[in-house]
Image (cartoon, rainbow, N blue to C red):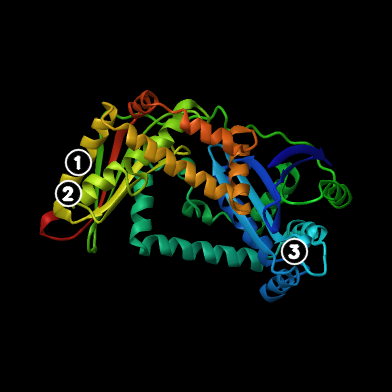
Amino acid sequence: MDYYSKTINGIEVNYLKINKHKHIIVAYNFISLYDYQTFNERNMIPNILENNMRKYPTKDKFNLHLDMLYGAIFKADIYSRGNLLANNFYLKFVNKKYLRDQINLTKDAFMFLNELIYNPKTYNNYLTQKSVNDQLYEAKDILKTFNQDKPTHAYINFKKAILNDNKKRLKIYPVEQKLKDVNKITITKSYFDMLNNDQMKIFVIGDFDSEEIDNIIKSNLRPRKITQIQTLKNFNNNNNKINSNVKDIKEVDELSISRLYLGYKVNVNFNSRLYFALNLLNIIIGGYSKSKLFSVIREELNLVYFIYSSYNHDTGILYINFECEPVDENKAIDQIKSIIDAVKHGEFSDLEIIRAKDYLIKQFKSRADSLSGLLNLSILADIEENQRFDLDKTINDYKNITKADLVEASLLLSLDTIYRYTKKDDYND
């Protein structure tokens, strides 16, 4: 893979040339500092733009145009990491080499993204009231789902508990407390902030003619000021106060089984040696089917229906989630604590490390083997480390992690919160 960057019209353009795919991806990425006050608006902008194009004003016309581009696929994503947020819009289309009539769709792809992002339907210089109302209705519907879906309800309340209901750090869309403040004025302002003040980057991935794309960008994207947004390379979670007393929170509802979360806090910088070690440690503890938690607590002791762990650097939390019968809650919690303590004392084998590394490396290879996965990895590497994604380097970073690194990382884990979402029965009375 050949990866290089240049600046055109004040826009950083990242070219990832790889010739084994039949498609090409063009992506526009807008990076800003995360702002709790406008988090709802920034999450709503992609849907508003997709559903309110001036040139293709209905969903049928929108989809018909994608069909005319030989089945092109459009997608919009939101990336939120630390103190950064990015709106990403991309189009995946067929390389002309694989079309019978050799039609070149590259310029059409850029024109489509330009139309979608820069030419939405407006009224009196505001995004339309209908488009805003549609998003508000959808956001309220999502909130209903949060309350009605038991696993989602449990996860959100766990996050609120471990983050002390810090609304600026929860980053769960929609932010209910701020929804009443959303209107066409606030959304339009956020939209123009994105266009005019964000750091804009373009990613092009596939087998393409970079000189042709240079000329398309020069001719069809207006010059913009070069905006530099700080990256997360030195971002850490030192505001993650480590508590000596573990919070044990119980919520009772009409449930068939108990859902529990154990949250461990940890403070580590992005791109540090221990950050990579924690990612690997998570796999060993509970990140896959050969993990300690799954092998012991589910398979050997049969205490839970499922169990897994996940490490989220953005919040500085490694959490363990499981479902079980209420009578087995404390037994499972004690076993989890015992396993974490054993890990801190280095009680895991070289074979467990090798298997975890193999699993994690296969995950990266699999993601990097698809265009959309490679785009995702490239954007995250850009946001988190201000550098290009390098699969070989990433693999080596994980291969070079030692048992000592893993033990050092495990010693940073501090149990902060136990959240129980359990059923009403005699056991809980």
| Residue matched to label 3 | 98
User: Which class describes the residues within 10 Å of circle 2: few (<14), some (14-19), or many (20+)?
Assistant: few
Q: Of marks 3 and 1, which one's residue comes earlier in the chain?
A: 3
| Quarter of the figure that contains the N terminus | top right
Q: Which mark is residue 146?
A: none
Q: Nearer the viewer, residue 248 or 414?
A: 414
Q: Which mark is residue 301?
A: 2
Q: Residue furthest left?
A: 426
Q: Hey, which quadrant is residue 423 in on the image?
A: bottom left
Badge 3 marks a residue whose secondary structure is helix
Q: Of marks 2 and 1, which one's residue comes earlier in the chain?
A: 2
Q: Residue at x 43, y 41 (%)?
A: 358
Please determine whether, in this image, residue 4 is positioned above or below residue 212: above
Question: Disc 3 and disc 1: Cα gap in Å?
Answer: 56 Å
Question: Disc 2 and disc 1: Cα gap in Å?
Answer: 10 Å
| Residue matched to label 1 | 335
- Residue 253 position, x and y percent, is 24, 60
Question: Disc 3 and disc 2: Cα gap in Å?
Answer: 54 Å
Q: Disc 3 residue type?
A: Tyr
